[in-house]
Structures are given as C-alpha cells and as structure tokens.
Amino acid sequence: MPIPVRFVLVHPRTPENLGAAARALKNFGQHEWTWIRPPWSPDDARARTLAVGAEDVLASARLGASLEEAVADCSWVVGTSGRAKVRPVPLDPEAFAEEAARRSGRVALVFGDERTGLGREDLARCHALTRIPSDARQPSLNLAQAICVYAYALARGPGRRVRDASRPGTDADLRRLEALLEQLLRGVRFVRPGRPGVAPLVVPWRRSGLTRTEIRLWESAIRTVARSLGKPSDDAHLS
C-alpha cells in the first residue's frame, strides 16, 4: 500500500499539468492534494481533458490561500527544489519515501510553480528538501512528471513503519513556538525591528521532528524565562 502524502502545489500555472498530475496520483494510489492560489477555476476543461480516468482526484483537490494554511496540521513538510546546491542537502525521491514511511504524523510534499519553483521564503518554511537527480544539461521536469516520479517512489516504498508512538508536533505547533520565542527575544532586544526574526534559530527545531510533548516543554521554558525577566532581579536590591 502506498505511503499517504499530501501533495501541495503552490500557485500552479497550467491547468493541463493539473489534469496530468491527477492521473499520475491515481496511477500510484495517492489522492490527497491542495492547490494554493491557482489562477483559474478548478473545473477548467483543459485540466479535465488530461485527467483521463482520474476526474475524481482532480475534483477532490482542496484550495488553500497560503502554504502556512495548507501544511498547518502536517508534522513533516518537505519542499522540492531543482537546484543542486541548496541546504539542507536534498533527499532523492527514494530517500524521501523511506523517511516518509517512518513518520507517524501527516507528511506534506510541496511543489512550486512551473516557472520559478518554490521561493526562498517557502523553502525556509520546509523541514527538509528533496530533489530529483536529473541530468545537469536538462535539470527541470514538468510539474506533472515530477509528481509522477514521487508518487511512484512512494508506491514502491517499504510501507509505513512508524518509529514510535509519540505524537509529532505539527507545523502550526512549531509556528506557535517560533512566535513565542520571537516575542521573548524582541523583548530583550536580541531581535530588533528591521532585522531578521528568529527563523534561523528555529530551523533545527523544524528539522529535528519535535514531538508535541517536547514543544510544550519548550513553550513552558520560554514562558518561565519571560516571566522571570518581567520581575525585578534580586541583584537590584544589592548596593
């Protein structure tokens, strides 16, 4: 049985690609996907023309306003990138499928638009990256072709093997923790107006796969520090 993954398409431009992608998803047992800000109606006739036998998958696509909304309940968010020199080092499709099989929470696989791929801000929101190792002379793949490669890798994968029973933190949980840390660090002027926030500091959290228990522990620690900073120090009474 294929490993279930949510395919998230950020601003897909070509309805024909979506029709072909729906067919590829159904070919390999995938059915959950979200489109973010498509510039045309989901029932576009051009998409239906290429969704041969997969009209139900095409019609089932959810529409989202942002990547943040689309992956809020996911515990592992992986972005696709055609660039060879990016950090962290991208997983190939097979390695992605193997790791997805070990994850107990929802997994999202994110694709950018057909012309530019995922932007820097969207890539920064991802917990890991993946790349199809194509020939350097022709590195880019058509969106539907790329989706087909990943759907095939997931279908051939080892099947779901959850590592432990701990409940993984979701992307929304991590964003809440990030906001709490930023509030604290702005209060002590470690983070200042007009400068980057705490995103670089929380990248290790995103990659490590914190559980909900671990996230709650971090939240408790940050709140404790914030409360202690709001009280007069004992040293202030010393002369």
Image (cartoon, rainbow, N blue to C red):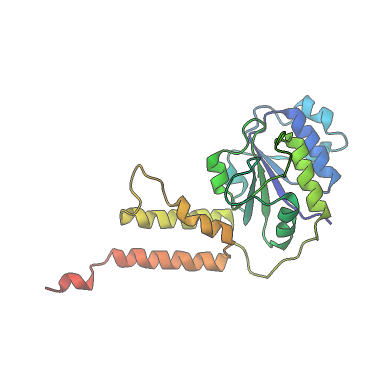
Above or below — where is 221 with respect to 154?
A: below
Q: Say which quadrant the N terminus sits in.
A: bottom right
Residue 59 visible? The answer is no
In this view, which residue lies farthest toward the left? 239
The picture places residue 46, in percent across and down from the top left corner, at 78, 25
Which image quadrant is residue 162 in?
bottom right
Above or below — where is 203 with respect to 230?
A: above
Q: Left or right: where does residue 68 sit relative to residue 23?
A: left
Residue 73 visible? The answer is yes
Q: What residue lies at 80% left-to-right and 60% top-to-bottom?
A: 159
The picture places residue 94, in percent across and down from the top left corner, at 76, 53
Q: Left or right: where does residue 146 sit relative to residue 223?
A: right
Name the one closer to the observer, 220 or 87. Answer: 87
Name the one closer to the observer, 89 or 237. Answer: 89
Q: Say which quadrant the C terminus sits in.
A: bottom left
The picture places residue 17, in percent across and down from the top left corner, at 75, 32
Above or below — where is 197 with respect to 142?
A: below
In this view, which residue lies farthest toward the front? 137
The picture places residue 59, in percent across and down from the top left corner, at 77, 37
Name the one closer to the observer, 41 or 47. Answer: 47
In this view, which residue lies farthest toward the right? 53
Which image quadrant is residue 188 in?
bottom left
Q: What residue lies at 60% left-to-right and 44% top-to-bottom?
A: 85
